[in-house]
Image: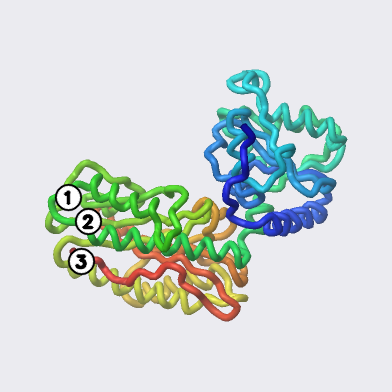
Amino acid sequence: MTINKGSQAFPRTEYLRRLAEVKNEMRRREIDVLFVTSPSNITYLTGHTAATAYVPQGLVVSLDEEEPTFFLRQMDAPAAIRQTFLARSNVIGYSEDLVGNPDMDGYDKVIEFLHERGLATRGVGLEPGFLTLKQFGRGQDKFKVKLPKARIVDCSKAIDRIRMVKSDLEMVLMRESAAIADAAIVRAAEVIRPGVREADAAAEIVGTLIRGVNGKPGTAISPICFCASPYTGTAHVRWGEDEFRDGSQINLEWGGVRYGYTAAIMRTFIIGAPSDRLRRIHEAEVAGLEAALNTVRPGATCGDIASAFNRTMAKMGFKKESRCGYPIGIDWTEPTASLKEGDITELKPNMTFHLMLGNWVDEDFGYVISETFRVTESGVEVLTNTPRKIFEI
């Protein structure tokens, strides 16, 4: 039975537009072929979101071909055929004898392809960070050894920088993801009660993240941080077996996800009345958040946003040690910039960021609030739309 294409997140023209930008960068770097191994960048260029990066895989982008060629394990090839815009002939599943083989793996199939297409003696770009995972061996070395006549070029973060600026079509998914993240906060406020197990509350929240809102389901689950007392001084704890009780504080963080595109949110909950310390840091954080958002505009820098937040916090007697956020899009983070003082990355319209203002003050005390926002032509659009308050249960 022939596999039919599934619903596509974007039209073919959108993927070809992205590929055209990547190819322009390839020409600038004087390379003829780029081997893309970052799962997020593969999603960006093809629409593929299946969990197939547990073994070698990658996308060969050639200046000579309109579409890239996707190499992955044979059992995973049907997912790529269905999920991506690629022609069936451009999805190549490598045989099972290359899995768990100490001498050869899927990268050897890619190298063979480059030789067959006459690309083995030309400029070849690699993403080394995804070629050195232990279970894959030293993939970068393999390319250097088996392509001795090629000019190997490090293309780390080249595509990541391109995808920092979203298209209008991408922004549709970012807004849908933000609405799902907001809906999960609403559900949290309904289910967090004294005597309820953390696990049971988390199950209800996850259900909302999957069901979605407005007829748009979540298509994946991003990491969920569920830092309930006594873990409020931690950043990345999951839910447990404990029950909520009077006085429990719960610091929550998650993201809504649509076809890989993620919008994140953080909020602080308290069962009972907040302490004076919690109320004061909340007021300082909200003031800092608003100062940071008021700084957002094209031409400003990531460092400007962090400076605005930090100055405001300092005036109110508080300090945040960690950075104030990062670019967000496919797979939560885009590893290109930071909202921290000194980062001179210039803001451009349709860049999106997670203004992450979690503040872990002591081992037993912390507070969280955040927003996902877009840089507009003249300022800022906050995509998440949850009240900036301590949720008192």
Q: Earlier in the sequence, mark 1 or mark 3?
A: 1
For mark 1, give the secondary structure.
Answer: loop
Can you say whether 285 is above or below 83 in the image?
A: below
| C-alpha gap between disc 2 and disc 3 | 12 Å
Residue 284, x across and y down, in percent: 32, 73
Query: Can you tell which of label 1 and label 3 is closer to the viewer?
Result: 1
Name which quarter of the figure residue 82 lies in: top right
Are the two marked residues, 2 and 1, in contact with CB atoms closer than 8 angstroms? Answer: yes
At horizontal 78% and vertical 53% (from top left) the residue drawn is: 23
* Mark 3 neighbour density, 10 Å: few (under 14) some (14–19) many (20 or more): few
Identify the mark nearer the N-term, 2 or 1. Answer: 2
User: Given the image, on which type of amino acid does mark 1 rest?
Assistant: Val
Q: Which residue is mark 1?
A: 196
| Disc 2 from disc 1: Cα separation | 8 Å
Q: Is residue 273 visible?
A: yes
Picture colour scheme: rainbow
Image disc number at residue 392: 3
